[in-house]
Image (cartoon, grey):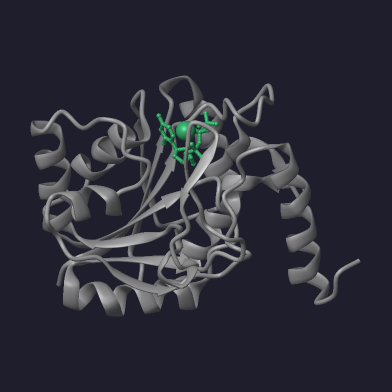
Amino acid sequence: MKKTVALILAGGSGTRMGSEIPKQFLLLGGKPVITYSMEVFELSDEVSEVIVVCNKSHISVMEDIVAVTGSRKISKIVPGGDTRQESSFLGLSSCSSSTGYVLIHDSARPFLTADGISDLLEKAANTGAAAPVVGINDTVVDICDGRVWGIPSRETFGRIQTPQVFKYEVIMEAHKKALERGVTGAGDDCTLVFSSGGEVAVTEGKEENIKITSGMDMDLAQLILKTRTFGVRP
Ligand code: CTP
Ligand code: MG
């Protein structure tokens, strides 16, 4: 029986956040942001193994975090690369040949859910790739030189989140093809599957599954956490 592996990407330095320590290590509700993702994968019946990718200078910090979470599924901590794409490829390359599906997740998204994972795995079984998408509330504009050139219907546009789920051979092939084409800076993994001609299914993402990017997102994350814990906004 092939395994389903979750890959948590934590190799970034959080330049836009501008904090001294990378955002995945900042404390949210008293524990590091990355811990939330580790806990969801630990409790998911569908995930059998978890691999964490991080900058090699943070491996010992990560080992301490893993020890505190008491995770039994985290099999290894892999040194990451200079770009998200490279970190993802290094993590994927460390998976064993018995990997059937892989979930690739940003460590900066603490609010993923177990039912989100089930939906994604179900979709990816048909297409080979699936990602959660949320809608856009503002008007979408095509801009250039300080002018609006087009206003597409926002109903047909969305924002893609993680975790993104792939058949292992599909995502490995997409990464290899991207490297052959000289692509190194993809912002996510679905982009690589799509741009190499693959099919990507979508599931309904959740607004609360934010990616902590700047300081304001940390405030929003605190608020989401309180809502989840107490059921009401303070
Ligand atoms: N990531 C990674 N390896 C990199 C760059 C990013 O594993 N070389 C991870 C980050 O740790 C993050 C996820 O990819 O969880 C999404 O990236 P992003 O939000 O861009 O995080 P950073 O690259 O850390 O932030 P910034 O772009 O502001 O520097
Ligand atoms: Mg980045």
Please say if 146 is above or below 123.
Answer: above
Q: Which image quadrant for residue 19?
A: top right
Q: Position of residue 38 (x, y in %)?
A: 51, 55
Identify the residue at image location x=28%, y=50%: 191
Q: Is residue 29 visible?
A: no
Q: Which image quadrant for residue 199?
A: bottom left
Q: Position of residue 12 (x, y in %)?
A: 48, 31
Left or right, 73 with respect to 233, comes to left
Q: Position of residue 144 (x, y in %)?
A: 46, 36
Identify the residue at image location x=30%, y=36%: 85
Left or right, 40 with respect to 84, comes to right
Left or right, 191 with respect to 64, comes to left
Along the viewing direction, whichever of 4 and 192 lies nearer the viewer: 192
Identify the residue at image location x=21%, y=55%: 194
The quadrant the N terminus occupies is: bottom left
Identify the residue at image location x=36%, y=29%: 83
Along the viewing direction, whichever of 100 and 19 lies nearer the viewer: 19
Along the viewing direction, whichever of 175 and 11 lies nearer the viewer: 175
